[in-house]
Image (tube, rainbow, N blue to C red):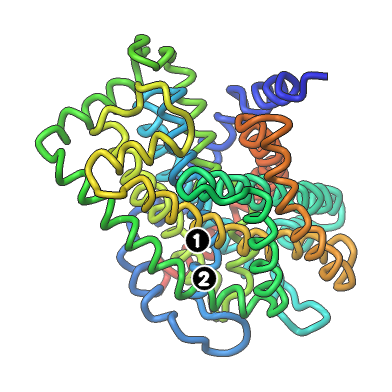
Amino acid sequence: MDVLAVLKAVSGFVWGPPMLLAIMGVGVFLTVRIRAVSLRKIPHGIRLLLDGRSTKGEGVSPFSALMLSLSATIGTGNIAGVATAIAIGGPGALFWMWCSALVGMATKYGEAVCAVHFRERNDKGEYVGGPMYYIKNGLGSRWVWLATAFAIFGGLAGFGIGNMVQANSIAHALHTSFGWDRYLTSVCLAVLVASVLLGGVKRIADVARYLVPFMAIAYLVMGLVVIAFHIQALPEAFVLIVKSAFTPVAAQGGFAGAAVLMAIRMGVARGVFSNEAGLGSAPIAHAAASTDNPVKQGSIAMLGSFIDTIVVCSITGFAIVLTGVWSGGLEGVAISQAAFGAVLPYGDIAVSLALVVFAFTTILGWSYYGERCAEYLLGGRAVAPYRVLWVLAIPLGVMLKEYAGHEAIWLLADVLNALMALPNLVALVLLSGVIARLTNEYYFKK
């Protein structure tokens, strides 16, 4: 059986026009229902974020909750994912990534509001929440099956988007740049991940709190240098991105050409893969925050999509378009490496190291998401076995590359993302009245 062909067929079906319309449509719907708070109140969200750097009460601090969320979202999607989107869909794919992020900010906001409003405490007294809890507690017993479906899909999706894709990318980057053995890398990575997971959510949040801002700022500085080197061509690149979003791009160099629908599909799919708006993963992290108001955490959570896609992904995208490497026939992270390497000494190696750090924190963040799904399904006793399976899956991600190819990893992640998103999107629409009511009480009825 041709595994790649099957994955292509399934991915093409689940990420067809209906899913693209659902992702974007729910974002637009929530933006309207909350009166565009996700766009209008960005400064307020930043103030809340800066004020929430310390823990006040139980749980992790609001700042750490966002960093935990970003640790899972800022990963290979920001480097290899953006490159893949542009290589297949053309420069216009970046425009549709921006669109998915802007409407996704409302989705992220709604997810976090529901997560905090409907969260529970587990057997250890810790806050736990996410789509499975706001479906169960917000929609009632008739919808418990949907909560169960999300938990199953979420527990499985983590192994694709949050584990094997990331482990594969780390092993490939270190092998390409330094000649490190892929399997030895996967074993060392598994040991590092295991050592952090033993400390639970607080240790993961502590690692994310310090590592995520450092790695993001370092990557942004490198990207801005590349952009500054081509600053005169920036307006032309922006025009190309917007124009390519609405008109087909002809074949050139190693680029096979792309229709507008392909630009939309790749942009939205890779945008969702990167910022995870609508998947239901981020609210699992925000539910653990020490906060006294769901809207406050929602206002912080919505910044995640902005930082991840509008800022970090744009840096990668502009570097790729400005240097012209998008049409060179390269694949995946090699495109980003070529873009940075064209300007910076050892830029390709720097991109490899950035990807390694990004992917490592993503593995940590998604391990927390997955174990919360397992805990919902089977209780606290399921957490330890899930962590063991999580660590064992890291070398498997490298082996899957050898047997199924680079593209198969991304296709598998896309399929699992779609299955995870469906229950969450349904829940957000049904709970939109609650989100709107809480928003009005906080922002408009003071």
**Nearer to us in this view, 189 or 18:** 189
Q: Position of residue 233 (x, y in %)?
A: 14, 32
Q: Is residue 261 left or right of residue 383?
A: left
**Nearer to us in this view, 50 or 31:** 50
Q: Position of residue 134 (x, y in %)?
A: 71, 60
Instruction: Look at the picture and state if 55 lies above or below 30.
Output: below
Q: Secondary structure at mark 1?
A: helix
Query: In this rendering, which labeled residue sits more in front, label 2 or label 1?
Result: 2
Mark 2, residue position: 208
* Identity of the residue drawn at 63% across and 74% down: 288
Q: How many marks?
A: 2
Amino acid type for the residue under numbered disc 1: Leu
Instruction: Look at the picture and state if 164 lies above or below 111.
Output: above
Considering the image in quadrants, where does the N terminus appear? top right
Q: Position of residue 263 (x, y in %)?
A: 44, 23
* Identity of the residue drawn at 42% across and 70% down: 445
Instruction: Look at the picture and state if 203 lies above or below 224.
Output: below
Q: Sort mark 1 into few (<14), some (14-19) or many (20+) by Cα contacts within 10 Å.
A: many
Q: Earlier in the sequence, mark 2 or mark 1?
A: 1
* Identity of the residue drawn at 50% across and 28% down: 266
Disc number for residue 70: 1
Observer able to see residue 118: no
Q: Position of residue 337 (x, y in %)?
A: 37, 41
Amino acid type for the residue under numbered disc 2: Ala
Disc number for residue 190: none
Q: Are marks 2 and 1 in contact (CB under 8 Å)?
A: yes
